[in-house]
């Protein structure tokens, strides 16, 4: 065996990808990075605010401070604070002199409303986990495995071509067989391409993904309505008039009609309201961007894998409307690009292919690796001219 053929064999052996059947791709990302960020913020931020509200309540004691009459004992003053916090109703008179009652209940339910918000924001995550992740993980395992296997098959095919060329005594016979194999598409492995083409007609993953983001927008809109309708109404009210003349105290003359109370936790309430509105306002463009990503194909990823035989979704213009499961799978392939070992090799080959002086007849990794192994991508001109001279 000549040094050139030995060097070519070593080069092709190094280009083969390692077998990863044992690892089973345990590091698969089944959520896109932006979706993970939205999940952590939309769910974690209300929980953080809830802990802040509870910490303030435990550290400062009663969330209100009532100005009880001077003749009240300490136990009576504590009763006033407890009674006014339980009712949390502001008594006032309108312009006509009629008694008007205004409830301040958003202050009381603040920690629990934040907990309910976090649970509501986690529902789309649960929907994705149970409705989409099982099918998505199996799709990604198969596609990533087949992409790497298709690359390896191409390298082994070049190794086989190199061995046949070395053993062939007649170069004309070798080139005739090689041209026939290319013409009959023997080098192509269409299983993966057909599988991906079938995914264009499937819409279960994309429907679940759209539903997930739609629910996030819906719950965000409900949060805006809640903050605007209930929190804004009591946002600036620090003091309120409380009535404790109920039950046994109704006929007591020494008990005043109204007692003024102050909300000591108003600052926490305002911080929670403003920060919630600001954070969810910032999340809305991110959620809308997640929608827009489904309106276009990731053609860079596809163009790199066009180097594989029988993977010409772009060149055949087989891509139609991008709102289907295939586009979702491509987004997750991009997120799991570290699991695609063949992507880095094919990216390098694409760069070398684009910078090659002679670009004709270099379509796939088989053609390019054949050229790197020291063989012409097509029949040499001197052999073609020799055949023309023998058969004028």
Image (cartoon, grey):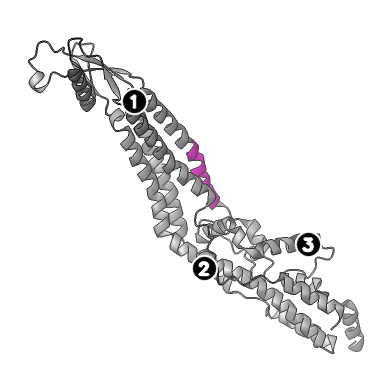
**Is 184 placed left or right of 112 in the picture?**
right
Of the residues tagged 2 and 1, which is closer to the observer? 1
Above/below status of 100 relative to 370:
above
Quarter of the picture holding the N terminus: bottom right
The image position of residue 218, as x and y in percent, is 39, 42
SS of the residue at dot 3? helix
In what element is the residue under mark 2?
helix
Q: How far across and how far down the image is residue 257, in percent?
A: 16, 13
Q: How many other residues sit within 10 Å of disc 2, few (<14), some (14-19) or many (≥20)? A: few
Residue 60, which numbered label?
1
Horizontal placement of 247 versus 2: left or right?
Answer: left
Can residue 202 be seen by looking at this rendering? no
- Residue 198 is tagged as 2
Mark linked to residue 352: 3
Cα–Cα gap, marks 2 and 1:
62 Å
Range shown magenta: 282-294
Identify the residue shown where x is 33% and y is 24%. 233
Number of callouts: 3
**Residue at the image point whose x is 37% and y is 36% from the top:** 50
The Cα–Cα distance between marks 3 and 1, rounded to whole angstroms, is 68 Å
Name the side, left or right, on which 102 lies relative to 329: left
- The correct choice, above or below, for 66 with respect to 349 in the image is above
Prevailing SS of the magenta stretch = helix
Is residue 53 found inside the magenta-colored segment of the image?
Answer: no
Report how far apart the C-alphas of labels 2 and 3 lie in the structure.
32 Å
Residue 123's label in the rendered image is: none
Residue 19: image location, x then y, percent: 62, 72
Relative placement, left or right, of 6 versus 82 is right
């Amino acid at each position: 065996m000549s040094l050139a053929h030995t060097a070519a064999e070593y080069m092709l052996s190094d280009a083969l990808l390692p077998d990863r059947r044992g690892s089973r791709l345990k590091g698969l990302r089944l959520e896109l990075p932006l979706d993970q960020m939205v999940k952590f913020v939309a769910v974690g931020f209300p929980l953080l605010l809830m802990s802040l509200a509870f910490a303030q309540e435990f550290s400062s004691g009663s969330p209100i401070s009532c100005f009880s009459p001077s003749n009240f004992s300490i136990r009576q003053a504590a009763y006033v604070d407890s009674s006014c916090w339980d009712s949390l109703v502001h008594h006032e008179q309108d312009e006509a002199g009629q008694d008007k009652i205004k409830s301040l209940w958003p202050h009381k339910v603040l920690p629990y409303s934040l907990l309910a918000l976090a649970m509501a924001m986690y529902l789309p995550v649960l929907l994705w986990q149970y409705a989409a992740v099982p099918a998505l993980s199996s799709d990604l395992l198969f596609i990533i495995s087949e992409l790497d296997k298709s690359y390896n098959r191409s390298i082994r095919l070049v190794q086989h071509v190199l061995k046949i060329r070395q053993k062939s005594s007649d170069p004309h016979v070798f080139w005739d067989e090689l041209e026939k194999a290319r013409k009959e598409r023997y080098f192509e492995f269409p299983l993966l391409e057909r599988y991906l083409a079938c995914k264009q007609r499937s819409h279960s993953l994309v429907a679940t993904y759209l539903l997930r983001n739609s629910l996030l927008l819906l719950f965000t809109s409900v949060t805006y309505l809640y903050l605007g309708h209930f929190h804004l109404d009591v946002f600036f009210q620090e003091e309120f008039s409380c009535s404790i003349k109920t039950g046994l105290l109704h006929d007591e003359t020494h008990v005043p009609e109204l007692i003024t109370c102050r909300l000591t936790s108003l600052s926490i309430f305002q911080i929670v309201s403003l920060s919630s509105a600001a954070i969810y306002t910032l999340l809305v463009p991110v959620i809308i961007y997640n929608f827009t990503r489904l309106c276009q194909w990731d053609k860079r990823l596809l163009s790199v894998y066009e180097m594989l035989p029988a993977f010409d979704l772009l060149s055949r213009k087989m891509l139609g409307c991008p709102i289907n499961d295939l586009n979702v799978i491509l987004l997750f392939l991009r997120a799991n690009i570290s699991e695609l070992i063949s992507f880095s090799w094919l990216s390098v080959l694409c760069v070398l292919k684009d910078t090659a002086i002679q670009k004709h007849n270099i379509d796939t990794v088989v053609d390019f690796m054949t050229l790197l192994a020291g063989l012409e991508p097509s029949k040499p001109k001197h052999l073609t001219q020799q055949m023309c001279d023998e058969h004028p």
